Image (tube, rainbow, N blue to C red):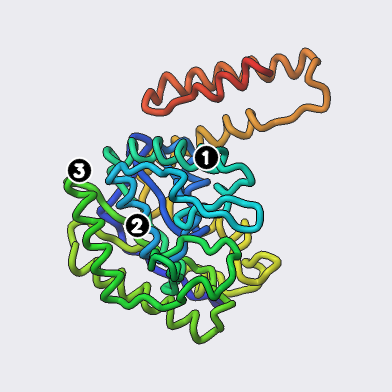
Amino acid sequence: MDFRTRIEIPKQDISMNHATRMMLFGSCFAEHIGRKLLQHKFKTEVNPFGVLYNPSSVARSIKRLLSGTSFTEADLLFHQGMYHSLMHHGQFSSTDKQACLNQISDRFAKAAEMIRSTELYLITFGSAYAYAWRETGEIAGNCHKIPADRFHRFRLTVEEIAEEWGEVITLCRSLQPEAKFIFTVSPIRHWKDGAHENQLSKSILHLAIDRLQNRYRESVRYFPAYEVMMDELRDYRFYDEDMIHPSSLAVDYIWQRFSATYFSDSTRQVNEEWSQIRRALDHRPLNPVTETYRTFVRQTARKLEAFAMNHPEISCEEERALLQIK
C-alpha cells in the first residue's frame, strides 16, 4: 500500500540549464529555491528587494527595475532609530541612512542590469493581503513593525493581480520576447491572518495564476510547490519548529521535484558533479597544515579546473580564490 498521495507534475516545455539567466522574486519560498540554484552555480539573482509576500509588491519591484529609477534618501523613512524602505525587506534597513541607501543601491544596480537580459522568471506569491501606506497609498513590501494604524490592510482581488501582472509580463517580454514565467504559491501559511483567511488568500493567488496561464499560454507556467507540501508532505516531520515553515527535508524534496521537472539529464549530471566539488570545498579539516590535507586541496583544485574547462558557461572564480586562501 502507498500511504501518501503523490502529486503528478506533467512534463514541462520550459527547461533551464547553467547558461539560463534567471531571476527569482517573492516570498521566503523563493529564497529556498533560489539558494539551491545558487549553490548549484546557476546564473541567478534572488530577491533583490528581499522577501516580498503580496503579488503587487513583487510586480512593483520588477517595474522599478525595468524603469531603472534608482532610490534616493526621499525613498527612506525613519522609525525607532532605523532607516527603512517600504519597498524592501528589513534586511536592507540600517541605523545609518547612507548604509541603508548603499545596500539598496548596490543590489538595485546589479539587478537592473541583469533583468534586461533575463530569460526566465520564477515568481512565488505568498499572500493576497497587502498593506497600503496611508500617507501616499503606496503598497508596502514590508511594514517594518511600524504601527498598524499607519497602513490600510486589504485583500487583492484576482482581477487586480492578473491585470497588474499582465503589465509586468508584457514589459518583460518587450525586452526578451522569449522570456518565460514560472509561478508558484508559497506553501507557508500566513497563520496570523487566521486559518480561513489564509485559505481565502491562497485561493485568490491560485486563481490569479490560472488566469495568467490562460491569458499568456506561450509564456506562463505553474509549479505545484504548494500542492506537494500540502498533500505529499502532510506530516509535521516536514515542518520546522514553528509548524508553519517547511523543514530542510521538505525543501530538499521539493527541490528534487523541481529538478526533475525543469532540468535535463545532462543538467542534473552537472549539478551532481558540482555538488561533489562543493562538498570538498566546504570540508573543514581538524589540522589544515598536514600533508594529507594539502594533497586533498591539490586534488580538489584539479577537479575544479577540470570542471571549469568542461563547463565554460559556469564561473568558478570565487572557488579558485577560496582554494588559493586555503
Residue ID for mark 1? 103
First of labels 2, 3 by sequence position: 2
- State the image coordinates of residue 217 (x, y, percent, origin top left): 19, 62
Q: Residue furthest right?
A: 287
Residue ID for mark 3? 175
Type of amino acid at the residue the image marks with label 3:
Leu
Q: Residues within 10 Å of mark 3 (few under 14, many from 20)?
A: some
- State the image coordinates of residue 186 (x, y, percent, origin top left): 47, 66
Comparing labels 2 and 3, the label whose residue is closer to the camera: 2
Comparing labels 1 and 3, the label whose residue is closer to the camera: 1
Type of amino acid at the residue the image marks with label 1:
Gln
Type of amino acid at the residue the image marks with label 2:
Arg
- State the image coordinates of residue 6 (x, y, percent, origin top left): 46, 71
Q: In percent of the image, x 44 and y 55: which residue is there?
A: 87
First of labels 1, 3 by sequence position: 1
Residue ID for mark 2? 60
Q: In percent of the image, x 76 and y 17: which residue is there?
A: 292
